[in-house]
Image (cartoon, grey):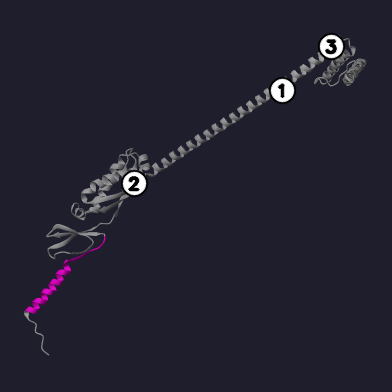
Amino acid sequence: MPELEITGFSIFVIAFLLLTLVLVFMGVRSIPQGMNYTVERFGRYTRTLTPGLHLIIPFIDRIGAEMNMMETVLDVPSQEVITKDNALVQVDGVVFFQVMEAARAAYEVRDLERAILNLTTTNIRTVMGSMDLDMLLSERDAINSRLLTIVDEATAPWGIKVTRIEIKDITPPKDLVESMARQMKAERDKRAQVLDASGDREAAILRAEGEKQAAILEAEGRREAAFRDAEAREREAEAEAKATAMVSQAIARGDVQAVNYFLGQRYVDALGQFANSPNQKILFLPLDAANVIGAVGGIAEIAKEALGDQEQRIQRRGSVPDAGV
């Protein structure tokens, strides 16, 4: 079996292949999703590598900065802020940002996250320090909107986009919280008293309206009763006038029985009024019973005469057809 002779040329070829493999291995770069790498040639930025497989020149090109292109959250540490009305409050928050241009984010600012935190902290003090405590506690959305506009505009040259700034917590001093609680309680008590007064007012109005309607209905009832009483008195007067007229006619004819009836009726009515008087319980009067009996007899005679006249009229009506025949 012949021996394998290794010459100088063979050694050179093997060394060249090994060097080529090492160079290729050093020049191949795999960029993960969500990341961008900057490439520097002799210390100067040349290009940006996006996610995927890339090839650089070893010993000439190198990876400069590895930038995370996903949205990132930074916690803003708690800090003290003095409001416009000199109230001291503790404030913290969060910042959401995303790198849009990897080269500018890598070379326009040193320590990007620290720069964003310092810029946000400063503007929180500026914005919230220009507001009263009541506005600070009630207009959190307006504060977030103003902070977002200011910080996003300031960080635009760094190739990033600030998507959101949220104030997490605003903590006033303990004594101020107690004072606010007392104020809130007093305000609620005031609203309760106003509601009670309004309810009493509505109830009084409804009661007055009900009494008004009751008075109107009562007045209408009295008016209707008075009208009916007047109508009854009018009819009674008409009947009395007719009776008086009939008695007058009877007197004119010389009918003594009618006169006795009229006087007897008045006599009996007068006795009834004396008997019904509320101030008299026992009545002693000298009574002439003959007059009353005579009046009753007069009534009987008048009834007989009236019945006799009615029978004569009926007989005359019955005889008229016979005369015609």
Task: Determine the CA span between mark 3 and mark 2.
Answer: 116 Å
The residues colored magenta run 9-33
Q: Residue 90 carries which label?
A: 2
Residue 296's x, y, as percent?
Answer: 90, 18
Three-letter amino acid code at disc 3? Gln
Q: Residue 249 carries which label?
A: 3
Residue 116's x, y, as percent?
Answer: 25, 50
Q: The N terminus appears in which quarter of the rendering?
A: bottom left
Residue 183's x, y, as percent?
Answer: 43, 38
Q: Which mark is residue 310?
A: none
State which mark lies toward you, 3 or 2.
Answer: 3
User: Do the residues bearing badges 3 and 1 touch, measured as CB atoms within 8 Å?
Assistant: no
Secondary structure state at the residue bearing disc 2: strand
Q: Which quadrant would residue 184 be assigned to in this image?
A: top left
Determine which residue is flagged by label 1: 228
State which mark lies toward you, 3 or 1.
Answer: 3
User: Do the residues bearing badges 1 and 2 touch, measured as CB atoms within 8 Å?
Assistant: no
Residue 219's x, y, as percent?
Answer: 65, 24
Placement of 51 over or under 11, stated as above or below = above
Residue 125 colored in magenta in the image:
no
